[in-house]
Structure formats: C-alpha cells, structure tokens
Image (spheres, helix red, strand yellow):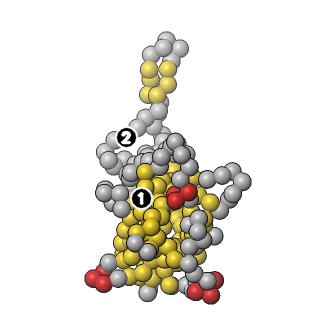
C-alpha cells in the first residue's frame, strides 16, 4: 500500500474526551528514505565463511558462503557489499537497510521473494521506498549489546524470516529462514566488517 493512497493524521483526546485529529502540517507518511551508505562491507557466517555473489549462466546469480583469504577479497569479486541505511518513519526495532554488490561492473541488489528465497537482481537501490514493506529492505538487529559487528537481518516483506545460511550439498547458501524464538539459531547471525 502506498503512502499516497492513505494519509495518516495524529489524533488527540480533548478535555471533553472527544477524539480530535491534529493538524497534519509537518507529518510524514510511512516510508523509507535512503540516508547514507557504507561501502566495502564483508559478510561472514559463524564459520568465518565469506558471502560471495557471482554471475552464472543465463543471467542467474548465485550466492554462497566460502572460505576466503584476505588476499582473495579484492574489489569487484562479489564480496564487497554496500549497506544502504534508510530513515524509518515507523517505530521499527532496528535499522532498515538494503544491500547491493558490484560484480563485473554490474550492480546487484539483494531481494527476498514471496516464497522466502533470496535473489540478487541487477538493479540500483532506490532512494525512496513508498511502501511499508519491501523486498529489498531488511531490519538490522543487534545480536548482542557487546558485539558491534554481529547482526541478524529480518525481512520487512516476510516478518519473522531472517537472512541465514544453510548447507546445501557441499555449499553454504544464503537463505531466508523463520526464526524459532524458543531456541538460539546461530545460522541467522552475520558478522559485518
């Protein structure tokens, strides 16, 4: 739903206990607006494997976690992500972010699908998103108050689902995974550096 379709007004109770709508001057609709971006960020899982994005056949893009040395982490090889921070006009717990990566002079944006998969699409990250949910926005949440580099990222499109890694055959793939609130699931923890 677009903020152009529904306008929200603040409401107050008067002394007579009637409900009054406040003047809408200065109010903003619920949407995300890009505030800043941090480049050259590397994502690692709990096994210190690096998230790597590479183009495949027929414009397919694969994403896997692989062990890599510092010398292999060269710019443009699909491991240096840009984290785009958005200003949030709602009361989300966490920071709204989007991710992009440059591979072979093309920019790919991380997206989640309705069937809870993660894909990288060749497109730029938008400056504004006029919706209250988005396939590219993830809510960055701290894992621990003492660890400033470990996070979990919840999909804004599919609440309760987090970026995670899963072993598929001999590869660790990036997936969306439902968080089980009853137990600790380290597969949804990502270190960003």
Q: Judge the density around disc 2: few (<14), some (14-19), many (≥20) Cα neighbours within 10 Å.
A: few
- Determine which quarter of the picture holds residue 50: bottom right
Q: Which mark is residue 7?
A: 2
Question: Which is nearer the eye, 53 or 11?
Answer: 53
Helix, strand or loop at label 2? It is: loop
Helix, strand or loop at label 1? It is: strand
* Extreme-right residue of the structure: 146
Q: Is residue 90 above or below residue 33?
A: above
Q: Which mark is residue 176?
A: 1
Where residue 71 appears, x then y in whole percent?
Answer: 62, 87
Label 1, label 2: how far apart the Cα atoms are: 32 Å
Where residue 182 appears, x then y in whole percent?
Answer: 52, 42
* Extreme-left residue of the structure: 58
Residue in the image at 38% along x and 51% along y: 158
Q: Is residue 21 above or below residue 50?
A: above
In the rendered view, does 1 fall on the left or right side of 51? left
Where residue 144 appears, x then y in whole percent?
Answer: 66, 52
Residue in the image at 61% along x and 53% along y: 142
Residue in the image at 53% along x and 14% along y: 15
Where residue 187 appears, x then y in whole percent?
Answer: 52, 59
Closer to the N terminus: mark 1 or mark 2? 2
Residue in the image at 48% along x and 61% along y: 164
Q: Is residue 94 above or below residue 35?
A: above
* Extreme-top residue of the structure: 16
In the rendered view, does 113 fall on the left or right side of 162? left
Question: Which is nearer the eye, 79 or 6?
Answer: 79
Q: Which is more foreground, mark 1 or mark 2?
A: 1
Asked whether residue 50 appears in the rendered view, the answer is: yes
- Determine which quarter of the picture holds residue 64: bottom left
């Amino acid at each position: 739903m677009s903020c152009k379709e529904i306008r929200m007004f603040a409401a107050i109770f008067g002394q007579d206990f009637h409900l009054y709508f406040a003047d809408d001057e200065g109010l903003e609709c619920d949407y995300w607006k890009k505030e800043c971006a941090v480049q050259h960020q590397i994502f690692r899982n709990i096994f210190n494997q690096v998230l790597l994005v590479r183009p495949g056949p027929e414009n397919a893009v694969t994403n896997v976690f692989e062990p890599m040395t510092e010398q292999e982490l060269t710019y443009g090889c699909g491991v240096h992500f840009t984290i785009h921070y958005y200003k949030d006009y709602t009361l989300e717990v966490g920071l709204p972010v989007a991710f992009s990566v440059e591979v072979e002079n093309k920019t790919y944006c991380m997206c989640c699908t309705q069937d809870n998969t993660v894909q990288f699409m060749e497109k730029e990250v938008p400056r504004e998103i006029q919706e209250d949910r988005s396939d590219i926005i993830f809510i960055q949440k701290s894992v621990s108050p003492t660890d400033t580099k470990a996070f979990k990222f919840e999909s804004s499109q599919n609440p309760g689902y987090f970026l995670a890694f899963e072993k598929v055959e001999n590869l660790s793939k990036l997936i969306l995974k439902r968080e089980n609130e009853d137990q600790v699931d380290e597969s949804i923890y990502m270190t960003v550096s």
